[in-house]
Image (cartoon, rainbow, N blue to C red):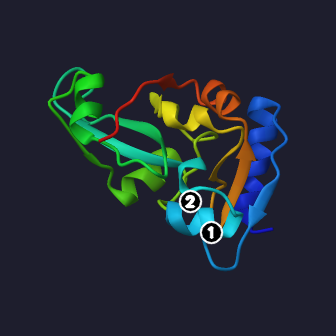
């Protein structure tokens, strides 16, 4: 197992008392479509974690996480409105790595270095099992969506286009 995927599994066990089964794929799972093809599920069952930077308001400069269904596109204006910011944009990859502890393409929905306010796409709750990144662009883990929302301490709210 890739060292970062193993680190994710260890963090999940230590922080949440959750044993995760990490699945790794040679082809990579950088996009929701690629992950769905690798896993053999619908694109909608991929729980993509997108880290967003807020501008303006009380959370100016803060990073937040959005766990969205791979079938949906995140609405950055809705994210800004939800968090009381003037604007929201995709987070800077270097800052994400520094603050969250994971690189884009492999950011898991849980086990971050810093606690991030998190929103959770209700579309994911339509599935029995969803798949989130497990610390690398080629690793995912399977989880019940309601359990995932609880572990991420996420607010279930539709912020997609």
Q: Nearer the viewer, residue 53 or 161?
A: 161
The residue drawn where x is 54% and y is 56% is 43
Dot 1: element: helix
Q: Which mark is residue 101?
A: none
Q: Residue at x 26, y 36 (%)?
A: 54
What x and y, as percent, mark residue 122?
Answer: 50, 30
Front-most of 27 and 125?
125
As helix, strand or loop, the secondary structure at mark 2 comes to loop
Observer able to see residue 28: yes
The residue located at (29%, 33%) in the rendering is 79
> In the image, residue 12 lies at what x, y percent?
75, 40
List the residue tagged with mark 2.
Answer: 106
Real-space Cα distance between discs 2 and 1?
A: 16 Å
The quarter holding residue 88 reads: top left
Image coordinates of residue 115 in percent, x first then y, are 52, 31
Q: Is residue 130 above or below residue 1?
A: above
> Relative to 108, is 157 on the left or the right?
left
Image-based side of 39 in relation to 21, left or right: left
Residue 91 vs residue 89: left or right?
right
Name above or below for residue 42 compared with residue 10. Answer: below
Front residue (pair 93, 76): 76
**Residue at which label 1 appears:** 37
Where the C terminus falls, by quadrant? Answer: top left
Q: Is residue 98 left or right of residue 84?
A: right
- Label 2–label 1 contact, CB within 8 A: no
Q: Residues within 10 Å of mark 1 (few under 14, many from 20)?
A: some
Q: Position of residue 76 (x, y in %)?
A: 26, 41
Identify whether 25 is placed above or below 69. below
Between 24 and 42, which is closer to the camera in this rendering? 42
| Camera sees residue 83 | no
């Amino acid at each position: 197992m890739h060292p970062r995927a193993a680190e994710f599994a260890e963090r999940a066990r230590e922080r949440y008392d959750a044993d995760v089964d990490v699945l790794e794929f040679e082809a990579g799972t950088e996009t929701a479509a690629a992950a769905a093809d690798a896993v053999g599920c619908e694109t909608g069952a991929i729980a993509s974690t997108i880290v967003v930077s807020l501008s303006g308001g009380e959370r100016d400069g803060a990073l937040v996480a959005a766990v969205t269904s791979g079938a949906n596109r995140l609405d950055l204006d809705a994210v800004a409105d939800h968090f009381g910011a003037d604007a929201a944009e995709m987070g800077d990859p270097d800052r994400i790595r520094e603050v969250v502890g994971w690189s884009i393409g492999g950011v898991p929905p849980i086990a971050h270095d810093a606690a991030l306010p998190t929103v959770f796409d209700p579309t994911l709750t339509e599935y029995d099992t969803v798949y989130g990144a497990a610390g690398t662009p080629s690793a995912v883990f399977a989880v019940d969506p309601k359990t995932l929302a609880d572990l991420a301490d996420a607010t279930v709210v539709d912020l997609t286009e």
